[in-house]
Amino acid sequence: MQRLRLLTLLSVATLTIVPAATDAAPKRKFIAADSSKKRIAVVDESGKTIWQRRIGPLHDFQMLPNGNILLQDSWTHLIEVDPKTDKIVWQYDAQTSNGNTGKRVEVHSFQRLDNGDTMIAESGPSRIIEVDKSGRLKKIVHLKVRKSSPHRDTRLVRKLANGHYLVCHEGDGVVKEYDSAGKVVWEFAVPLFGKKRRGGHGVNAFGNQCYSAVRLPNGNTLIGTGNGHSVIEVTPMKKIVWKLEQNDLPGIQLAWVTTLQVLPNGNIVIGNCHAGPKNPQIIEVTKGKKVVWSFTDFQRFGNALTNSRILTMDRRPVR
């Protein structure tokens, strides 16, 4: 396991866009990960890197209540790291555990649950599992996909407060909600909006390979449409009531929309992956589609910054 030293970069290319009504630029501390630079890092509100670690492919991480970070350093190897010591305090290898030996498997999402178990979405085996601290299998939920794929069965998956699972099926372009027994109780097919599919990953590509979904307090679902270059809010009756499109933000183009985070002030933080150095990698917008903060730094992070999460807003912790 290789470790990157903590460092202060000579150039911090942080772009902050301030609303006209405020006198001071908003400050954000965040964690982000980029597979092209093989780096996961915490950046404080001044723009300084205060922790980082070398990674491999990564599509998910989680900041734990104890301050540790749950992440992956390969498509199958999950680790919990204490950032104070950089020591691994828990690990799990999906490739060799719970019946997967010899199978093609990739993990694109995982979540530490309130009871201490870990939920893992396994693409290839097309299942969600829950394991205890020793890796012992405690639960299996089988996923329903048109054609199983170790790379495209899922992107982000989250277990909801009601015990259901909200699953982004990237290959199928569908968000599904499964109950605890594995029954699909709600689903939404991400539309192409009358456009033709175009290959690739950048701003000129197009599709509906959804990456993220967040269940909102009002019961609606916020969806990051991946290469659909958009964020949409959908009601339980599958009506789109809000949409942020590729060119809605002045001077910014959305490419592969990845992680979504709704902040306490109602703003939405968007991961803008594969958009190129002319566009920010992380964007915070209001529901009125005004950019209040953004981050661009192609020295620390590259064109594959897939995952990010705001940790503090003007020194106030974000839970």
Image (cartoon, rainbow, N blue to C red):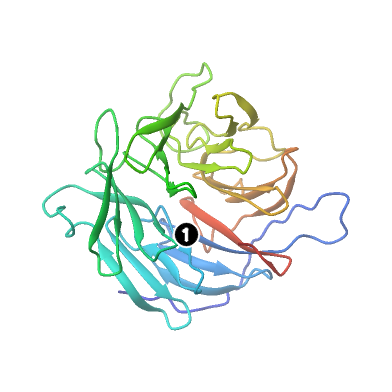
Q: Quadrant of residue 13?
A: bottom right
Q: Residue furthest left?
A: 102
Image: 26 above or below 212: below
Q: Residue at x 63, y 70 (%)?
A: 44
Q: Is residue 9 visible?
A: no
Residue linked to disc 1: 33
Percent across and percent down for residue 175 are 44, 34
Q: Residue at x 60, y 62 (%)?
A: 319
Percent across and percent down for residue 2 are 33, 74
**Is 172 placed left or right of 189 in the picture?**
left
Crowd rating for badge 1 (residues with CA inside 10 Å; few <14, some 14–19, many 20+)? many
Percent across and percent down for residue 75 are 29, 55
Image: 268 above or below 146: below
Q: Residue at x 54, y 34 (%)?
A: 229
Q: Residue at x 50, y 19 (%)?
A: 195
Which quadrant does the N terminus fall into? bottom left
* Nearer to the camera, 191 or 133: 133
Give the number of marks: 1
* Nearer to the camera, 230 or 98: 98
Image: 168 above or below 100: above
* Nearer to the camera, 297 or 100: 100
Image: 253 above or below 282: above
Percent across and percent down for residue 150 are 25, 43
Query: Element at badge 1?
Result: strand
Q: Is residue 169 visible?
A: yes
**Is 46 placed left or right of 175 in the picture?**
right
Q: Residue furthest top?
A: 194
**Kind of residue at disc 1:** Ala
